[in-house]
Image: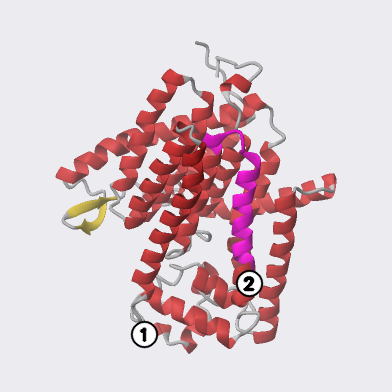
Amino acid sequence: MRITINKRALPLSIIIMIMIVQIPLMKTFKILQYLDEGWTVVSIVYLLVIIVMERKMEREMFVSFWIIMLLLGIGLLGNIIWQIQTGTGAILTDIGNMFKTYMTLYAGVTYLNHWEEEDKLALLQYVNGFCCIIVTPGFFLAITNLFVNINMHTEYVNGFRAFHYVFNRVGNLNMSCVIMLMIETAWMNYLDAQERKTQRVFLFMTLMLMLSTLRSRAYGFFIIYVLGYLIFVYGRSAALKAAALIAIPGISLGFGVQKFVYYFGYDTSARGVLFQYGVRTANSYFPIGSGFATYGTYAARKYYSPLYFKYGFEKVWGLSQKMGDFLTDDYWPAVMGEFGYFGAFLMLILITLMFFKVLGETGDYPANRFAGLFGLICMVISSMVSASFFHTMSVVLSLTVAVCIVCRKNMKDMVTFDSRL
C-alpha cells in the first residue's frame, strides 16, 4: 500500500494532535500555552471574514452570534457602570476565554464544510491514528500503576493510585480521553465490520485509561459512553434510542448534581465559597453583573479582582493572591457574577444551541451524533464543578465536536475511497 499525504488535512490534524497533548507539552514548549488563545483569535477573524463575504449565517450560528453580542454588551456595561475592572488587557482576555468554545465550534464547522470528502476522511484518519498511539502505552502504564509506583499518579483514592499518565493532573487526562473517544467513535463511520472490531479495542483501552483516574466524573462519563454507544452506534432499536434520550440526560444530571452538592454543600470549601459569592455578586450588581474580569475567571485571578479583597478571599486557602489555584475552579458562579442571572440564562441558551447544532446535522449518522453529544454532555457535567468552558482543552474539544459534525460520511456513501490514505 502506497502512503500519500493529504496536504490540506495534515496541518489541521497536527494542530488538533498538539492541542490534545498541549498541557504536558507546555512544560517544555512555553509558547504552546498561547495555542488555544491564538486559535480563538483565528476563529473569530475567520468567522467575521466569512460573514462579510458570504453575508449569511446558519440558524444556530446566527442566534449564537447575537446572544454573544448581547452578553458582550452586558459585560462591558458592567465594567463601565461599576468600574471594578477597567484594565483593557484584563477585559479582552476575559472576553476571549468567555466565548472561545462557541467561536471555535462555528468556525470549525464553517471551515470544514468547504473541504472535499477525501480531505475530511484524511483529517479524521490522521487524528484517530494519533489517539491510538497515545492510548496504547497509556493503557499498559495504567495497569502497571496499579502495582508499581511509576510516578504517574496524582493522589491515592481508597488505597489506589489515581493515574494521570503524562497529563500532570487526572482532570486533564479525563478530558483528553473524552476527546479521543469522540475521534475514535466518529472514525467508526469509515470502517467495515472487521475494522470496527479492531477499533473497539482502542475504544476499550481509552475507556479503561479514563477510569484509571479514579474520578467520579470519569465513572459518569464511562456509563454515559457505554450506554450511548450500545444504543446509538451498536443498537438498532428505536425504542432503545428513545429510552436513551431520557436515560443519558438523567444520568448526566445525576452525576453533575451529586458533585455540585458535594462541593457547594460545605461553606468552607473553596468551590463552596466561590459559589456563595458568585450568587452574592449577582445580587449586589443586579441585574447586569459586575463585568468582565471581575469574578471567577482566569483574568480575574491574573489581575486579582478588587472584589476578592472586598470578599476577604485573601484569608481563604486556595483563593488568595499568592496561592489562588482554586480561583478559576468554577464556571456558573463566574457567569452569574459577571453577567447576572439573565446573562447566565443567555449562556445556557448558547450551550443548548451547540446541542441543536449537533442534532440538526448528524441525523443519519448515529456514530457522529453520539460522538458530538458525548463531548458536550461531558463539558456540561464538568461545568458544575470546574471551569470546563473556560479551560484550555475546551478549544480542542469544541473543534473536535465540529469535526464530528462535518466528517460524517459512511463508507457506503463515498463515491470513491482512496486506499492510499
In the picture, the disc for residue 246 is: none
Of residues 372 and 131, the one drawn nearer to the viewer in this rendering: 372
Can residue 39 be spotted in the picture?
Answer: no
Residue 86 position by quadrant: bottom right
Q: Is residue 132 above or below residue 396?
A: above
**Residue at 78% over, 46% down:** 50
Residue 315 image position (x, y, % from top left)? 36, 85
Does the segment drawn in magenta span residue 126? no
Can residue 387 be spotted in the picture?
Answer: yes
Q: Is residue 163 above or below residue 193?
A: below
**Residue at 58% over, 62% down:** 97
Q: Amino acid at mark 2?
A: Gly
Residue 77 image position (x, y, % from top left)? 70, 78
**What type of secondary structure mainly makes up the magenta span?**
helix
| Mark 2 crowd level (few <14, some 14–19, many ≥20, 10 Å Cα) | many
Does the segment drawn in magenta span residue 358? yes
Tell me which segment is drawn in magenta.
Answer: 346-368
